[in-house]
Amino acid sequence: MIIKNKQKSFTLIELLVVIVIIGILAGVIMISTSSSIDKANFAKAKAFSSTIQNELLSNLVSEWSFDEFAINNVTKDSWGNNHGTLGDGTNNTTFPTYKTKDSGECVFGGCYNFSQVGEHINLGNNTNLNVNNEITFSFWVMPKTQISNFDRIVEKGD
């Protein structure tokens, strides 16, 4: 009587193929969830900013969203009358470029692209903006390139 021991097992090639397939699936899942993580982090930061703004609301002097195009280079103050101007408001020829949400460069609503030295928003010399060493600015900034000698994004008066 001959006894044959037939054990079935996987070959090394079969195991490697399974490992490669699992690796590819893991990579696809990580790529698809990274955009969701970015959106969740942005929503968390926006909620935090909203909370801070609600706490400071009783002392709010001005609010600029910069989500819409500046007509005649004037940015609207949605809270008061402290409208700002793009550039220095005189003969400055370098202005930040307005981008729409559809351009793919803005995270939320519209945005301005500051790409050259001298591009800024001047909030004017309005006396309503004179505060005694207590001022809070909140910005959503997405740095893309480094500008040498970049001096400001927003300025008040001179």
Image (spheres, rainbow, N blue to C red):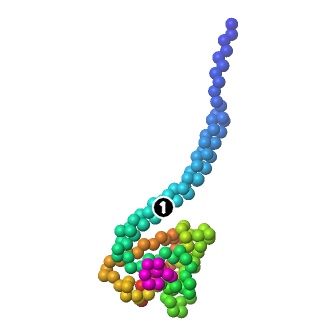
Horizontal and vertical percent position of residue 137: 40, 75
Horizontal and vertical percent position of residue 84: 47, 84
Mark 1 lies on a secondary structure that is helix
**Label 1 crowding class (10 Å Cα cut-off): few <14, some 14-19, many 20+?**
few
- Residue farthest along the left direction in this orientation: 132
* 44 and 115: which is toward the camera: 44
Residue at 47%, 84% (x, y): give it: 83
Residue at 44%, 87% (x, y): give it: 124
Query: Magenta segment: does it hold 80?
Result: yes
Query: Does residue 5 sit above or below 23 in this rendering?
Result: above
Q: Is residue 25 visible from the viewing direction of this image?
A: yes
Residue linked to disc 1: 43
Query: Magenta segment: does it hold 79?
Result: yes
Residue at 42%, 72% (x, y): give it: 138
Displayed quadrant of residue 144: bottom right
Q: Specify start and end residues of the magenta stretch as a single range.
A: 75-83
- Residue farthest along the right direction in this orientation: 1
Position of the C terminus, as image quadrant, is bottom left
* 22 and 74: which is toward the camera: 74
Query: Does residue 103 sit above or below 73 in this rendering?
Result: above
